[in-house]
Image (cartoon, grey):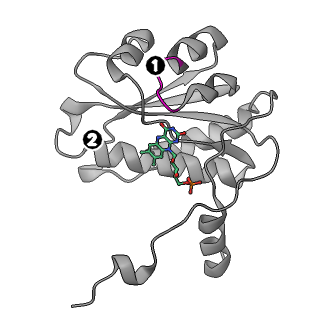
C-alpha cells in the first residue's frame, strides 16, 4: 500500500448521514465484521460483541433514543458495538473505540458511508437491544451506500495547536 495514498484515504473519510436504500452486500458486511474482529486490544482480550440490526422496526425504535442521530433509521443496516466490561474492565472503552474505527475505515474503502452515533439514551437503547445491564453500549454504526455528494471536510486543529516537542 502506498503510504501517501493511505494518508489521503484517511483524510478523505467523512461522516455520512444520507444513505441509499440498497441493502449492504453480504460480502461487504463480512469484510466490515472481519475488520472489527482483527482489531488490536489490550492483552488481546477482545472485550466486545457486535449486534447487527437489519430489522427496520428495531432500527427505527433504537434511532428514537438518539439525540443527534435520528437520521440513522434510514440506513439499511447498523452495527452496535458493545464493550464486555468484565472481560477487560480498564480497557473496554479504548478497545471498542478501535473496533469502530477499523469498521469505519473498512466501510469507507468499500464506498459505504457511516457515522458513529454516540449521543443516545444508552439505557433505553440497551433495553431495546437486549444488552446486559453491566455491558457498555459504545456506539451504533449505521451503514449504507452513500447517497448524494460527499460532505466537505470538517475542520481540524493544526498540528502546531496539538503538538509539543520535548
Ligand atoms: C465517538 C463519536 C460520537 C459521535 N456521535 C455522533 C452523533 O451522535 N450524531 C452525529 O450526527 N454524529 C456523531 N459523530 C460524528 C462526528 O460529529 C464527526 O465525526 C465529526 O464532526 C468529524 O467529522 P468527520 O467524521 O466527517 O470527519 C460522532 C463521532 C464520534 C467519533
- In the rendered image, residue 50, in percent from the top left (x then y), is placed at 46, 29
Q: Quadrant of residue 55?
A: top right
Label 1 vs 2, first from the N-terminus: 1
Label of residue 65 in the image = 1
Image position of 67 with respect to 114: above or below: above
Using residue 127 as the reference point, say whether residue 34 is left or right of it.
right
Tell which tag, 1 or 2, sits nearer the viewer. 1
Please give the name of the residue rendered at 77% of the width and 27% of the height, measured from the top-left corner: 23
Q: Mark 2 sits on what residue?
A: 92
Identify the secondary structure beneath mark 1.
loop
Identify the secondary structure beneath mark 2.
helix
Q: Which residues are magenta?
A: 64-68
- In the rendered image, residue 86, in percent from the top left (x then y), is placed at 19, 30
* Residue in the foreground of this view, choosing between 141 and 26: 141
Q: Main secondary structure of the magenta part?
A: loop
Residue at the extreme bottom of the image, as rendered: 166
Using residue 75 as the reference point, say whether residue 116 is left or right of it.
left
Q: Quadrant of residue 164?
A: bottom left
Q: Residues within 10 Å of mark 2 (few under 14, many from 20)?
A: many
- In the rendered image, residue 117, in percent from the top left (x then y), is placed at 49, 36
Q: CA distance from mark 1 to mark 2?
A: 23 Å
Q: Quadrant of residue 21?
A: top right
- In the rendered image, residue 51, in percent from the top left (x then y), is placed at 49, 24
Image position of 138 with respect to 90: above or below: above
Amino acid at each position: 500500500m502506498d503510504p501517501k495514498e493511505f494518508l489521503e484515504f484517511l483524510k478523505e473519510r467523512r461522516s455520512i448521514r444520507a444513505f441509499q436504500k440498497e441493502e449492504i452486500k453480504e460480502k461487504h458486511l463480512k469484510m466490515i465484521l472481519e475488520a472489527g474482529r482483527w482489531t488490536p486490544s489490550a492483552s488481546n482480550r477482545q472485550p466486545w460483541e457486535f449486534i447487527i440490526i437489519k430489522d427496520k422496526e428495531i432500527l427505527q425504535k433504537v434511532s428514537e433514543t438518539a439525540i443527534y442521530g435520528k437520521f440513522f433509521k434510514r440506513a439499511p443496516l447498523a452495527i452496535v458495538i458493545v464493550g464486555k466490561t468484565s472481560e477487560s474492565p480498564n480497557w473496554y472503552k479504548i478497545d471498542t473505540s478501535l473496533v469502530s474505527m477499523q469498521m469505519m475505515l473498512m466501510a469507507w474503502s468499500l464506498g459505504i458511508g457511516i457515522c458513529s452515533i454516540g449521543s443516545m439514551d444508552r439505557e433505553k437503547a440497551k433495553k431495546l437491544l437486549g444488552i446486559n445491564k453491566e455491558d457498555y453500549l459504545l456506539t451504533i454504526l449505521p451503514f449504507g451506500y452513500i447517497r448524494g455528494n460527499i460532505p466537505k471536510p470538517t475542520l481540524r486543529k493544526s498540528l502546531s495547536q496539538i503538538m509539543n516537542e520535548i
